[in-house]
Image (cartoon, grey):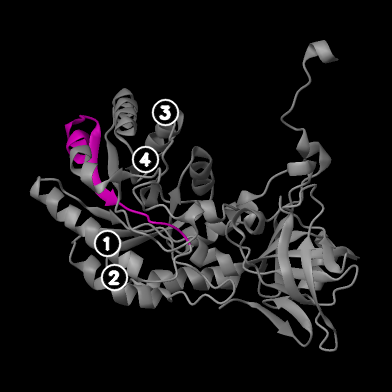
Amino acid sequence: MHDFQYKGNELYCEDVSIKEIAKEVGTPFYLYSYNTLKNHFNAFNSAFADIPHIVCFAVKANSNIALLKIFAGEGGGFDIVSGGELYRALGAGADPQKIVYAGVGKTREEIRYALKSNILMFNAESSQELFAIDEVAEDLGVKARVALRVNPDIDARTHPYISTGLKSHKFGISTGDALEGYRLARSLKSIDVVGIHKHIGSQITQTRPFVDALERIISMIDTLKGEGLNIKYLDIGGGLGITYKDESPPHPKELAAEISPILKETGCTIIFEPGRVIVGNAGILVTKVLYTKQSEGKNFVIVDAAMNDLVRPSFYGSYHSILPVNKNSDSNKIVADVVGPICESGDFLAKDRVLPDLKKDSLTAIMSAGAYGFTMSSNYNSRLRVPEVLVKGSEFFIIRRRENYEDLIRCEEIPAFLK
C-alpha cells in the first residue's frame, strides 16, 4: 500500500495536494511519502522479528540522504556498493556496524575508507579482491571482517538485467569454488571470516527462488562449520518485488513464513538487503504535458520528464502506471505513447498506453518510481536533474533542489591554451 490517493478528483500525497507542490517547485520532480517509507520499512523489519537480524536498506535503490536518515532512525542499516554510498550512509547517521559492502569492483581507496569507518563487513566477490582487502587491512593494522558472496546458480525469474544469481553472471564465487575461497580467506592474516552472502536478483515476485537459493547456501554453511569456520552472519540479499502493473509479489510476512524456519536453523544473525520493496511504491515522478500531437494516426503525449529522469522504461521496457493528477470521469480515452524531450527514439515513459485524453499543461504522476528512479538519472542532453520532495502529513520539504545551469559545468575546466 501507499499514500498516493485521490481526494475527490485530485491526487494527493498523504495530506498534500500534488498540484500545489507543482505550483511551488515546478515540474518534473520526484515525490516521496514519509508515511509510506516508514510503514514499508517497519513491515519488512517486523516480519522477521522472531529471528536475530539487521535490515540493511540497499542504497542503490534510492540514495537521497533524507530517506536514508528515515531508515537509520528506524534502526536500519545499509547495503552499499561504493565509497559514495558509504559517505551518504554515514552522513545520514548510520551505525557503521550495520553497514555491509558488496560489489565486484571495490577499489583500494574505497576499501581503506570502509575499514577506517569500521563497517560490519565486506561481501567479497573474488580471490583477487580478498588479497586487496587483506593488504589494505594489514597496512592499516586492522582485521577486515569478510563474508564471501556465493553464487547459488538459481534463476530468480526476473528481468535478465537484474538477475544476479546464475553461474553466467559476474557476481560472486560459484558454489564449486566457494570452499577454496573460504580456505584462502582464512589463510590471510588480516582477514576475519565472519559470514556468507548471496543475492540472486531484483524484482522477484515468487518465494520459491529465495527458498531454493537458501537451501544451497545453508548446505555451504554446514560445510564451512565443518572446516572450523565460525559463520556468524548469513546475508541473504534482497530482491523482493513490488506491484508495477499486475504482479502479485509476496508480502514480507509471506516471505518470512516461507524462509524463517530455515533461517532459524542456521544460528546466524540474518542480514537482509531490501531496496525496491521499501521505496518503489513510496515515490512518484510528477511531470507536465508540454504538447500533444498525432502522426500517421498515432498519438503522442510529450511531457517535460524524459529518459534521463526515469530510464527504467527505456532501459528495461519497464511498466509504470500513469495517472492524471486531476482526473475527469468524462474524459475520452486515447491510446498514446508518453514521450520526453530527449533526442532519442528510445525516450519514452509508456508505449501504446490507454490514457485519458490529456491536454497541454495537464499534470501526470508516473507511479512506482521511488526505486531506481532518481539514482539512475543523468544529465544527458545537458538536462537539469530534477528536485526531490518529501511529504510528511500536511507538510512538504524539498530534500534535493533542482539543478541549475551552473551545476552542469561546476566540475569542468577550460585549459589555458583554449582561453
The residue at the far top in this view is 417
Q: Is residue 251 above or below residue 176?
A: below
* Disc 1 target residue: 214
How crowded pointer 1 is (Cα within 10 Å; few <14, some 14-19, many 20+) is rated as: many
Q: Are marks 2 and 1 in contact (CB under 8 Å)?
A: yes
Q: Is residue 50 above or below residue 388?
A: below
Point out the image quarter for the N terminus. bottom right
Q: Secondary structure at mark 3?
A: helix
Find residue 355 and report its horizontal and vertical position in percent. Answer: 77, 76
| Residue nearest the observer in this picture, 326 or 294 | 294
Q: Are marks 4 and 3 in contact (CB under 8 Å)?
A: no
Point out the image quarter for the C terminus. top right
Q: Amino acid at mark 4?
A: Asn
* Disc 2 target residue: 259
How crowded pointer 2 is (Cα within 10 Å; few <14, some 14-19, many 20+) is rated as: some
Find residue 95 and report its horizontal and vertical position in percent. Answer: 41, 51
Q: Is residue 18 left or right of residue 173?
A: right
| Residue nearest the observer in this picture, 144 or 155 | 155
Q: Using the numbered discs, state the Cα–Cα distance from disc 4 to disc 1 in whole angstroms.
A: 28 Å
* Disc 3 target residue: 108
Q: Amino acid at mark 1?
A: Leu
Q: Earlier in the sequence, mark 4 or mark 3?
A: 3
Image label count? 4
Label disc, if present, on residue 118 of the rendered structure:
4
